[in-house]
Image: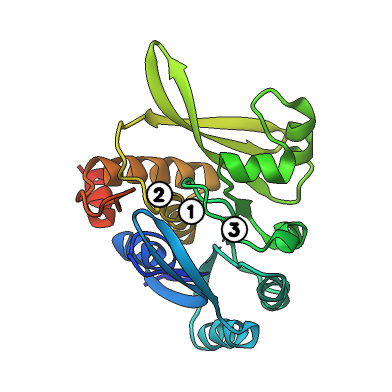
Amino acid sequence: MKVALTIAGSDSSGGAGIQADLKTFEAFGLFGCSAITVLTAQNTTGVTDIYEISPDFVKAQIEAVLKDFDVSVIKIGMLFSNEIIDVVKDVIKNLDIPIIFDPVFISKAGSKLLNDDAVENLKSLFQYSTLITPNLFEAKALFDYEELNKEAIEKIHSLPCKVVIKNDKKIKDDELLSLDTLFHEERKSLFYTKLIDTTNTHGTGCSFSSAIAANIALGKSIESSIEVAKYFIYNAVLNAPNLGHGMGPIAHKKGYECLKN
């Protein structure tokens, strides 16, 4: 059995963060390990409080897992502070393991998930990453990205890692589609599914990145992993359990089962 490690924040409502990552790993048949960076008090309506874990303890969690397990892939999510970014960097800089980095600092609901002084330091992790997966808000903040902004696209292509920008929308043949764009090797690849009219999207970004990580661990290419992850999320949203009073969680197990049908 392949082993995946997620380094991210905990979501008390179980829909995003560490909880979403572990559910995704299990759905794809991987054994998931975790290193928790922050505890959050949150539900489907938003984040109400954040408690930062000691950076030394974050490092201890990661090292404990790496010492005992043959980890096939690492997914990094919410890091929150310069101090946590620095200890994660110190641990991963010499690893020969695929790293999928979801540079979480602006949620779809607009919640701030990173200290203001840590955004530039966050970029220092790109050189150790195989792929980064910012949403549109994060890509705008990181690269001033817009679809036709040539300067931003050139900046993305100059990075030492591949980039997939998620949560875009596009109209094609009079149909509204969900679009993710992969920038790699001076070109871009587009990944579409139908856009579902729903509020059940809590944790989709975390789960998408974890699904990519899981499929890379299983031997698929980055392009194939993104394609599988895209349809996994589509089916998980389509079969969401309709829980909570805000942005509801998705159905991880059902999302994977639909891939097999």
Q: Secondary structure at mark 2?
A: helix
User: Residue at point 64% right, 82% down?
Assistant: 55
Q: Which mark is residue 101?
A: 3
Q: Is residue 103 above or below residue 143?
A: below
Asked where in the image residue 135 lies, by quadrant, the reply is top right
The answer to whether one can see residue 122 in this image is no
Reading the image, the residue beneath label 1 is 209
Q: How is the image coloured?
A: rainbow
User: Which numbered disc, 2 or 1, marks the residue closer to the eye?
Assistant: 2
Q: Residue at x 31, y 32 (%)?
A: 196
Instruction: Report which residue position mark 2 lands on.
Output: 204
Residue shown at the point (73%, 41%) measured from the top left: 143
- Quadrant into which the N terminus falls: bottom left
User: As shown in the figure, which amino acid type bears the numbered disc 1?
Assistant: Ser
Q: Secondary structure at mark 3?
A: strand
Taking the image as shown, residue 78 lies to the left or right of residue 248, namely: right
Q: Quadrant of residue 2?
A: bottom left
What percent of the width, then of the height, locates residue 3?
43, 72
Q: Amino acid at mark 3?
A: Phe
Assess disc 1: are there few (<14), some (14-19) or many (≥20) residues with their C-alpha within 10 Å of its C-alpha: many
Q: Is residue 113 above or below residue 185?
A: below
Q: Is residue 148 above or below residue 184?
A: above
For the residue carrying disc 2, how many other residues have a C-alpha within 10 Å: few (<14), some (14-19), or many (20+)?
Answer: many
Q: Is there any visible trace of residue 58 in the rendered image?
A: yes
